[in-house]
Amino acid sequence: MSETLALSKDLINRPSVTPEDAGCQQMMMEYLQALGFDNEIMNFEDTSNFWSLRHGKTEGPVFVFAGHTDVVPAGPLEKWNTPPFEATEKGGYLFGRGAADMKSSLAAMLVATKRFVNDYPNHNGSIGYLITSDEEGPFINGTVRVIEELMKRNQPLDYCVVGEPSSSEQFGDVIKNGRRGSLTGFLNLKGTQGHVAYPHLADNAIHKSLKALDELAHTEWDQGNDFFPATSFQIAIIKAGTAGNVIPGEKYVEFNFRYSTETTHEELQQRVIAILDKYNLEYDLDWKLNGEPFLTDHGHLLVAARNAIKTVCQIDTAPLTTGGTSDGRFIAKTGAEIVEIGPINKTIHQINESVKIEDLDKLTEVYYQILVELLTGPETF
């Protein structure tokens, strides 16, 4: 059994449902301490975090592995073919909650780091780890808080590999070099409740808002660019009405933007308000900025990542910005180059989550090759 597989199983066996860590981070810190890392626990409220750093022989870039030990709930246990928190090998796959998202990536990071510092004890620059237990949850006390603290200290971060499951059909075919921004709106539309037989005495909150919602749904917010698709608007929740013979006096709508670098969350908010006001609606509107878009469209890290995947997998990877968001959105505030590299994402958050066992050592080798390219030789920074 490879060390990456063994560590993956160790981590999966710990039921670290957000925000619980279940000892995952303690195991990781002990592993890193043995490699010469200085660990700092940075817990906030109910969330476990740690920041770890190992300095090489020379000054230079700070390379960071970032990830999360928390996982989503298992769901109905009876629907799993194997116990979700008992890592199981079956048919060439490793099953268990977190196998793909993202405990196998954490294991690969550790093993790649161990191999690298043993092979290059006097490497250039520094290697860091930023690990949280609050990526799958409300993301309030996790990476965002650690980054705030590191920025107060003027701690530089130059390169960051996030271990999110980026691959699509085969390992290495896709890496994420950016993510769209995410903005959620919480809209309460107001009318006047009344009896359906006496509409002249009421003001139907559903009827009066239909044109505005239709315009919001069909507005072209931008056309995207070479790296991002066009900004999308999606209504996720609509609630209204109390009974079949009652005209609703209120209507609740929750919607989300996934937006490109062609616009800003402030511009989107202003345009939504302009459309609502155009139809003389009475409403309350609150916003939640889940994350701003970020992009690494060039630089040493992107080159190193593509070279490593070409060497290990013999394929040309595709840098994409599709999908959801990640903690990379918080790390991007430091100015670091960021890429996300991880296993195939087809089963993440699903029943019977799994990862190909043969991909674990490939992922480890990719991480190792990136470290070699960025932290050895004269042209590393």
Image: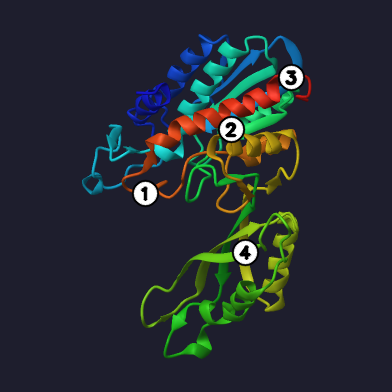
Where disc 1 sits, the SS reads loop
Where does label 3 land, which residue? 377
**N-term mark: 1 or 2:** 2
Instruction: Judge whether 60 appears above or below 205 on screen.
Output: above
**N-term mark: 4 or 3:** 4
Q: Position of residue 253 (x, y in %)?
A: 53, 66
Cα–Cα gap, marks 3 and 1: 43 Å
**N-term mark: 3 or 2:** 2
| Image marks 3 and 1: residues in contact by CB distance under 8 Å | no
Q: Amino acid at mark 2?
A: Thr
Q: Is residue 158 left or right of residue 22?
A: right
Comparing labels 1 and 2, the label whose residue is closer to the camera:
1
Q: How many marks?
A: 4
Quadrant containing the N terminus is: top left
- Which residue occupies the foreground of this view, 108 or 143? 108
**N-term mark: 2 or 4:** 2
Q: Quadrant of residue 322?
A: bottom right
Instruction: Judge whether 109 appears above or below 322 on screen.
Output: above
Comparing labels 4 and 3, the label whose residue is closer to the camera:
3
Quadrant containing the C terminus is: top right
Where does label 4 land, which residue? 232
- Which residue occupies the foreground of this view, 7 or 208? 7
Q: Amino acid at mark 1?
A: Gln
Where does label 2 land, which residue? 143
